[in-house]
Amino acid sequence: MENDIFRELKYLAFTARLKRISDNMLYNAKDLYKELELDIDPNWHLIFMMFKEKDTLTMTEIADAFQISQPAVIKIINKMKQKEYLISTKDATDSRKQLLQLSAKAKENLPKLEKVWEAGRKSIMEILEGNETILEQLDEIENQISKMNYKQRVLKNLQDD
Amino acid sequence: MENDIFRELKYLAFTARLKRISDNMLYNAKDLYKELELDIDPNWHLIFMMFKEKDTLTMTEIADAFQISQPAVIKIINKMKQKEYLISTKDATDSRKQLLQLSAKAKENLPKLEKVWEAGRKSIMEILEGNETILEQLDEIENQISKMNYKQRVLKNLQDD
DNA sequence: TTAATTTACTTAACTAGTTATGCAAATATA
DNA sequence: TATATTTGCATAACTAGTTAAGTAAATTAA
């Protein structure tokens, strides 16, 4: 770890380092669910959390909230439907829309799942211990990117030399 | 951005947030190279940086340095070979090993590429402005994970309740 | 010096995202 | 009110990573 090339490269390896950590966490989570014999995916918890605030959602609402593409949402939702965690009905006033709701199975399993997510939350707190300000820093980084994205900045920086 | 669900969820959305940022940067970088008509991938710069310190490398050395799986390295290297940025020769004393080196084409293109990477480095510095300590925080986070990974922590936290 | 183990690389099948494209329903506009 | 635009969802093809399993060469151990 001491002579970690990502550490040496600093700014140049920032993205790769974020990816390394998030991939590591993702595959850990998949492995965890497998070991606990839960037929759910990492990131479904985000969907469940959204349903806490509003019991009917559409694909578009989810894509907007997560800031991921619609095709990505469709894949997640289709899998949740296939595993019978979600049910969908057509909107009566706008037949393009699918109204999504948690199924009975989902609600039934919720207490068990929430225990795992709570343990997950604690685990993240442990991992971030002493470095909790990273959460606000990530906010600010996303803010900077939304003002001018990476590509635009590089093009600008290529010009002024 | 103000009512960003990831922000509300705090610890529970930490991994998703890292993924969101790193994906955003990755696709920006791909788009950038396309616009600049450079037939290289994001992350090749890490390989090039390794070759600055040592002009012959093996697959395993790269996988170890980046802490990514061997199949991932093979895919990157094969593409670099296919695009003629790398050449490989069999190790004389150990025929399992491939000795990898930058090609003449790679060395020729290096000055042009380095301009882009330098503009990239500046762009990351801009994006992180005022939040540079995130780099050390990421070090510490990877340190924590290496002591006990996410899965192990969740299993532990599930037990002690 | 044969047998067992480890190492270096490879291949296959999968995953969670992307962009590009398309279609049909709803809405806005001439 | 016909036409143009926008919206909501869907599909296809691609990408950068993963794990699992396998092969052949090198090394270690009996």
Image (cartoon, coloured by chain):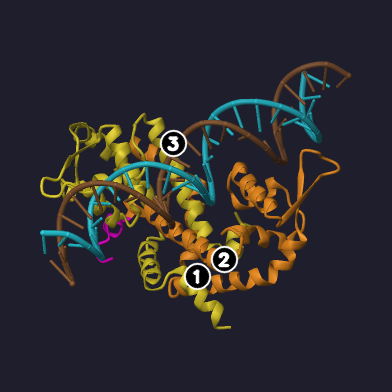
Chain colours: A orange, B yellow, C cyan, D brown
Element under label 1? Answer: helix
Residue type for callout 3: Asp
Quick one: quadrant of the C terminus of chain B?
bottom right
Return the x and y of residue A65 as percentages of the image width and height.
64, 52
Residue situated furthest bottom in the rendering:
B160
3 and 1 marks on the same chain: no
Q: Residue at x 23, y 49 (%)?
A: B50
Q: Mark 2 sits on what residue?
A: B12
Residue A100, x across and y down, in percent: 75, 51
Write the residue at 38% across / 50% down: B124
Residue behind mark 3: B31
The Cα atoms of the two marked residues, 3 and 1, are separated by 33 Å
Q: Are marks 3 and 2 on the same chain?
A: yes
Query: Residue B84 location in percent, x, y?
Result: 25, 32
What span is in magenta?
A1-10
Instruction: Give me the C-alpha separation between circle 3 and circle 2.
Output: 30 Å
Chain letter for mark 3, please.
B
Residue at image x 85%, y 41%?
A93
Instruction: Tell me the amino acid under the disc marked 1.
Output: Ile
Is the stretch drawn in magenta largely helix, strand or loop?
Answer: helix
Answer whether residue B17 is magenta in the image.
no
Q: Would residue A161 be seen by someone viewing this image from the given angle? A: no
Relative horizontal placement of residue B35, taking residue B61 as reference (left or right): right
**Does the image show residue B161?**
yes
| Residue A124, label in figure | 1
